[in-house]
Image: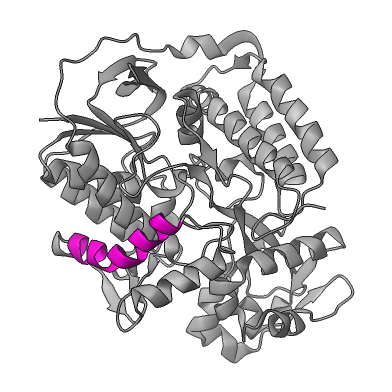
């Protein structure tokens, strides 16, 4: 029986864990929080885009290829479009509640609320995983993937609540850590999305691809004292959205892009809308005229969905509210093959931590189809590795990062996030990126002051933040032309 260690407990990690366990492996999942709680899957819309219900794999393939500016990995894309429907049917057969429609599927029926459309999905995956014998190590951060003779042989883990460190031997390791949205000050990602997987992959000798392609969700609430949360792209279909000069600019933009409304824009032109709103934001701001909302519209389910936040945040407003883009998704990541295999034997990856499927831009709904399809494939492949006598490795201690004389880690984190937004956000300039890379080098050398368990967690996440920010910056600087989610001037 192979020992498989899976790093990450979101949709990709849980799916991989279930697949590996059902294939006969002994499976351990490492989670920074309680299983699945802080994952992007839980906070997603709970919607899948896939070839089903009359949409052929070839049609889906061509749509994704076009959306990705034809920079997608063709083999990965073909695997996704050919197998995603069967992959979803498989997890449905295990007890996940899904509703299939033409070209789509939804897990929203079991969601806790409208803001967390994927919450029911991950709760069901956790239940299925535990029922089939998957074990979990929670409140812990993976520090290093041990390799020996060109093979992955284990993982060093630190419990950030109690400081205890462990060395977990493994016959195969699956990276499923998600993206790195928290390198930015403006993001809709949960707090724990700090690029741990990118740092682990680089340290293990893996290559990252397409890291310049960071998808920025076009519409987020940017008003002071508002939660940092997305609004739906259909917001402008219900109320006026204007620039600093009071001009309604969205209808002209939609016509130019060949989409009829905000709903179509969400699927096929997110990158264009993000860039447009980022430009307008720099020029003085973009404003949603919530103060003009007619009384009848407050009973419209579509309008309430577009707001995403409870109506209490908006009722009685006398002025428009500012909106701006938010970081949403990393299209790039670890280079993989069609079973999630990487350049290190026994080391697999699946989900947002990987690159190649989306190319330069992601179509809405593709992320969840991706995590299930490749989670299943990576888990099964990892389970095939023969069991060998475990190697002994030293566990890394958290103390090496910390110093009583260091700068407070929360302060450094906020500073990094602000600078990342300015230099590698939606609009990029080569000189600003170069300065940012120098800044990254300087903070890598800083000792961190962390006195509480929460601060220790922030310190343990800093290597992921710096490695991810550096990877995005270097890739952005290397790609001279603007394409997809990457815009450089």
Q: Is residue 9 magenta?
A: no
Where is residue 311 shown, x and y percent of the image?
56, 72
Vertical placement of 40 versus 344: above or below? Answer: below
Query: Residue shown at 61%/8% (left/top)?
Result: 404
* Rendered position, 143 above or below 404: below
Locate residue 371 relative to residue 193 in the image: left or right: left
In the image as oriented, which residue stretches furthest toward the front?
Answer: 75
Q: Which quadrant of the figure contains the N terminus?
A: top left
Closest to the observer: 53 or 33? 53
Q: In the displayed orientation, state which residue is furthest to the right.
A: 245
Q: Residue 428 placed where, x, y %?
A: 77, 49
Which corner quadrant of the image does residue 472 belong to? top right
The residue closer to the viewer here, 361 or 364, is 361
Q: Nearer the viewer, residue 40 or 357?
A: 357
The secondary structure that most of the magenta stretch takes on is: helix
Q: Position of residue 390 (x, y in %)?
A: 20, 15
Q: At 45% across and 35% down in the image, what residue appears?
A: 197
Residue 99 in view of the camera: yes
The magenta segment is 74-92
Locate residue 148 relative to residue 197 in the image: left or right.
left
Look at the image and say whether residue 79 sits in the magenta stretch. Answer: yes
The quarter of the displayed image where residue 49 is located: bottom left
**Residue 339 in the figure: left or right of residue 390:** right
Spot occupied by residue 88 in the image (x, y as percentages of width and height): 25, 64
Q: Is residue 17 in view?
A: no
Tell me which corner region of the image, top left, top right, bottom left or bottom right, holds residue 181.
top right
Q: Residue at x 32, y 16 (%)?
A: 149
């Amino acid at each position: 029986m192979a020992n498989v260690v899976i790093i990450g407990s979101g949709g990709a990690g849980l799916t991989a864990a279930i697949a590996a366990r059902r294939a006969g492996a002994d499976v351990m999942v490492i989670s920074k929080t309680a299983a699945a709680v802080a994952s992007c899957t839980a906070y997603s819309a709970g919607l899948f885009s896939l070839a089903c219900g009359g949409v052929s794999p070839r049609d889906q393939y061509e749509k994704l290829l076009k959306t990705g500016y034809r920079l997608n990995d063709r083999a990965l894309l073909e695997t996704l479009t050919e197998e995603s429907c069967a992959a979803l049917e498989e997890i449905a057969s295990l007890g996940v509640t899904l509703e299939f429609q033409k070209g789509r599927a939804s897990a929203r029926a079991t969601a806790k609320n409208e803001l967390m459309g994927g919450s029911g999905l991950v709760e069901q995956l956790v239940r299925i995983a535990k029922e089939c014998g998957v074990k979990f190590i929670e409140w812990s951060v993976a520090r290093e993937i041990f390799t020996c003779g060109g093979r992955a042989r284990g993982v060093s883990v630190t419990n950030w609540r109690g400081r205890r460190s462990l060395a977990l031997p493994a016959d195969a390791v699956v990276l499923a850590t998600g993206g790195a949205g928290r390198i930015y000050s403006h993001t809709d990602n949960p707090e724990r999305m700090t690029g741990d997987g990118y740092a682990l992959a680089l340290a293990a000798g893996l290559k990252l691809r397409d890291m310049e392609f960071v998808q920025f969700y076009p519409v987020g609430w940017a008003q002071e004292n508002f939660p940092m949360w997305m609004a739906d792209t259909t917001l402008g279909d219900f109320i006026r959205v204007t620039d600093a000069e009071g001009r309604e600019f969205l209808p002209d933009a939609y016509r130019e892009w060949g989409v009829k409304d905000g709903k179509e824009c969400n699927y096929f032109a997110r990158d264009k809308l993000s860039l447009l709103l980022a430009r307008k934001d720099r020029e003085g701001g973009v404003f949603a005229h919530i103060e003009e909302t007619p009384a009848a519209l407050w009973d419209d389910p579509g309008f309430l969905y577009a707001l995403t936040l409870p109506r209490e945040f908006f009722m009685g407003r006398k002025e428009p509210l500012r909106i701006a883009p938010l970081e949403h998704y990393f299209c790039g990541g670890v280079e993989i093959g069609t079973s999630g295999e990487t350049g290190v034997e026994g080391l697999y990856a699946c989900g947002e931590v990987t690159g190649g499927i989306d190319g330069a831009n992601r179509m809405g709904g593709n992320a969840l189809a991706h995590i299930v399809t490749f989670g299943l494939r990576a888990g099964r492949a990892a389970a095939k590795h023969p069991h060998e006598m475990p190697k002994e490795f030293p566990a890394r201690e958290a103390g090496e990062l910390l110093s009583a004389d260091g700068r407070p880690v929360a302060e450094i984190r906020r500073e990094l996030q602000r600078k990342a937004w300015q230099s590698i956000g939606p609009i990029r300039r080569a000189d600003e990126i170069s300065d940012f890379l120098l800044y990254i080098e300087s903070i890598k050398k800083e000792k961190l002051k962390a006195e509480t368990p929460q601060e220790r967690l922030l310190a343990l996440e800093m290597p992921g933040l710096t490695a991810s920010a550096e990877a995005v910056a270097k890739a952005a600087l290397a790609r001279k032309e603007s394409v997809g989610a990457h815009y450089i001037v």
